[in-house]
Structure formats: C-alpha cells, structure tokens
Image (spheres, helix red, strand yellow):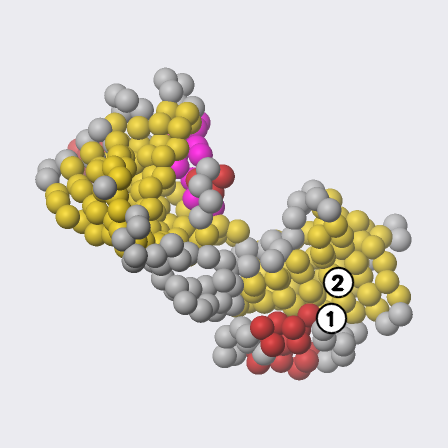
C-alpha cells in the first residue's frame, strides 16, 4: 500500500511540476485606498455583469468607507473609467444593477448610467493625462480623492502566464496584443528553446455588429536563449473575420501540420507550416 501511495504521489508531482505550462486566472474584485480631509478610506468593487458588446464595459457593486462610515456603491466601468453612485434608497441601487442591464448593454443604457442625477453621492475616476483623477460629489460639493498603492481603475483583469520553470514565468498579455485570449501549448523543443502556442481571442473590443462574435485564431512561436530569456515572437493569423481571412487544415502527418489561408477577395494567400517536434512556425506566401 505504501508503495502504491508513493508511486501515485510521484506521478502527481511529475504532472504538477512539468514545464512549460500555462496558468490563467481572473481578478474580478479590487480594493482602492484613498484619503481626503485627513481621513483614510477604502473603495471596494466587484464585477456584477459584463456588456454583451464591449469587453471594457461592465457593472460593478461594492462599498466605500471614508472615516468609518461604510456606504453601498453601484455603477459602471467603461473603458477603464469608473462611474459609481450611492443611493439613499436601496431599490434605486438594485434597479441600476439588476434592471438596467437585464437585457444586455445598449449604448442608450450606458449613457443613462453616466448621466444619472438622482444619486446621493457620486465617485468617479477619469483619465487625466497618464494618470487617473478621482472625485467625490455630493450635491454642490466636489472634492478630489487621493488614491495610492493601486494603479489604474480596472476592476476586472485576466492574466495568462507561460511558466518555464519554478523561477521564470512570462505574462503573455504583455507580449501579444489580444483581447481576452485563450492559449494552448502545441509544441515544445527544449534543444532549440522554442515553444509553439495556438490562440483564440475576441476580434475586437466592441464585439457587436458584423464580425463582432467572429473568429480570431492563430499561432505564436516563442524563441528563448540559453538563459530562457525571450528573444523573438512570431505570430501568424489563421482566421480573422475583421480582416476577411479564413484558413483551414489541408495536410497533417505525425509531427507536421499545414494550413492554407486566403482572404475573401483572394488578394492575400499564404500557407502556415507547423513543425510540432521542432516547435517551428513558418508562413509562406502563395
């Protein structure tokens, strides 16, 4: 029995610590620290619901505490700007969170939230050059809130890390410009220090309209030096509705896959050759 448990433990350790591997996690809650008039405060927000159209628009709910007086907040995050409201009557806050967005987000509803006037207090954060300016409003009074420790205003963030070993990881969001992507490792060559990834992402931030929910898929080859430092990124698109590019697999062998891609008007044609064993991605124009 001890031998079986020891073997199972060894297998779990082997699988759990095999590299490279991908780890993805999402942050949907955030706390901001602030102070004004000599009082320290906190603003806590959590994502309530996402826009059906835009990846950068979602409702939030939480509270703020200034000087020990905690109050409920509801509102909207739009393109990393915050519009937060405190209502004396809870049913008004519930209406904003649960009723306005029950059928999805429309631009009319978003404008209605931003320009709402029947609130008791308002906290907003907007761009001011390279920084964000936070303001608190109540009636005719308005005051700038000073924030610290946490940069930016986004409540929701998604992170995907390529973990090379226990001490070395790469945030893939920092090396490829993709919107809400998902990745998969499809090839690794330790001799040449190359890794192949496939990806699927949103075609654009505004996912409504033509091609809004369309395909945006492709492959990425990452090259590393002997110290596992990233030296090159090679990205090739397989399908993109926005660009009118459509591709599919045409040939497959044990370690190689070939795709052909062309545009709707045939002005662009190329072949993607993938060597899974050597982790090499090659684009050949036709």
| Residue 86: assigned label | 1
Q: Position of residue 256 (x, y in %)?
A: 16, 37
- Residue depicted at x 78% and y 69%: 121
Q: Position of residue 193 (x, y in %)?
A: 31, 24
Q: Main secondary structure of the magenta part?
A: strand
| Residue 165 belongs to the span the image colors magenta | yes
Q: Where, by quadrant of the figure, is residue 155 drawn?
A: bottom right
Q: Can the viewer see residue 122 in this picture?
A: yes
Circles 1 and 2, Cβ within 8 Å, touching? The answer is yes
Give the side of residue 281 with respect to residue 133, left or right.
Answer: left
The tally of labels here is 2
| Residue 280 belongs to the span the image colors magenta | no
Give the side of residue 132 with respect to residue 245, left or right.
Answer: right
Q: Can the viewer see residue 15 in this picture?
A: no
Check the image and report above or below for 133 versus 280: below
Check the image and report above or below for 274 versus 268: above
Quadrant location, the N terminus:
top left
User: Where are the magenta residues, as a range?
Assistant: 159-171
- Residue depicted at x 39% and y 37%: 162
Badge 1 marks a residue whose secondary structure is: strand
- Residue depicted at x 60% and y 76%: 108
Mark-to-mark CA distance, 1 and 2:
8 Å
State which mark lies toward you, 1 or 2. Answer: 2
| Residue 123: assigned label | 2
Badge 2 marks a residue whose secondary structure is: strand
Q: Where, by quadrant of the figure, is residue 219 drawn?
A: top left
């Amino acid at each position: 029995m001890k031998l079986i448990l020891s073997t199972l433990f060894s297998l779990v350790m082997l699988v759990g610590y095999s590299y490279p591997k991908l780890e993805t996690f999402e942050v949907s809650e955030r706390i901001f620290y602030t102070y004004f008039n000599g009082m320290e405060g906190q603003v806590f927000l959590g994502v309530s619901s996402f826009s059906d159209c835009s990846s950068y628009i979602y409702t939030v709910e939480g509270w703020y505490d200034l000087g020990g007086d905690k109050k409920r907040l509801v509102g909207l995050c739009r393109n990393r700007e915050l519009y937060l409201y405190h209502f004396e009557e809870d049913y008004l806050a519930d209406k904003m969170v649960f009723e306005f967005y029950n059928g999805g987000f429309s631009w009319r509803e978003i404008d209605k939230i931003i320009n709402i006037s029947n609130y008791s207090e308002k906290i907003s954060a907007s761009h001011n050059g390279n920084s964000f300016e936070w303001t608190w409003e109540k009636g005719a009074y308005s005051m700038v809130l000073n924030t610290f420790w946490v940069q930016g205003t986004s409540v929701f963030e998604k992170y995907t890390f390529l973990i090379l070993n226990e001490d070395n990881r790469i945030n893939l969001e920092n090396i490829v410009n993709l919107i809400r992507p998902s990745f998969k490792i499809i090839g690794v060559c330790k001799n040449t220090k190359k890794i192949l990834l496939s990806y699927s992402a949103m075609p654009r931030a505004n996912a409504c309209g033509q091609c809004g929910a369309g395909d945006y898929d492709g492959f990425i080859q990452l090259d590393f030096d002997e110290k596992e430092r990233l030296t090159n990124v090679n990205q090739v698109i397989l399908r993109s509705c926005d660009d009118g590019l459509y591709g599919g697999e045409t040939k497959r062998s044990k370690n190689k896959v070939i795709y052909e891609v062309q545009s709707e008007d045939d002005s662009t044609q190329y072949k993607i050759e993938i060597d899974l064993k050597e982790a090499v991605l090659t684009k050949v124009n036709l």
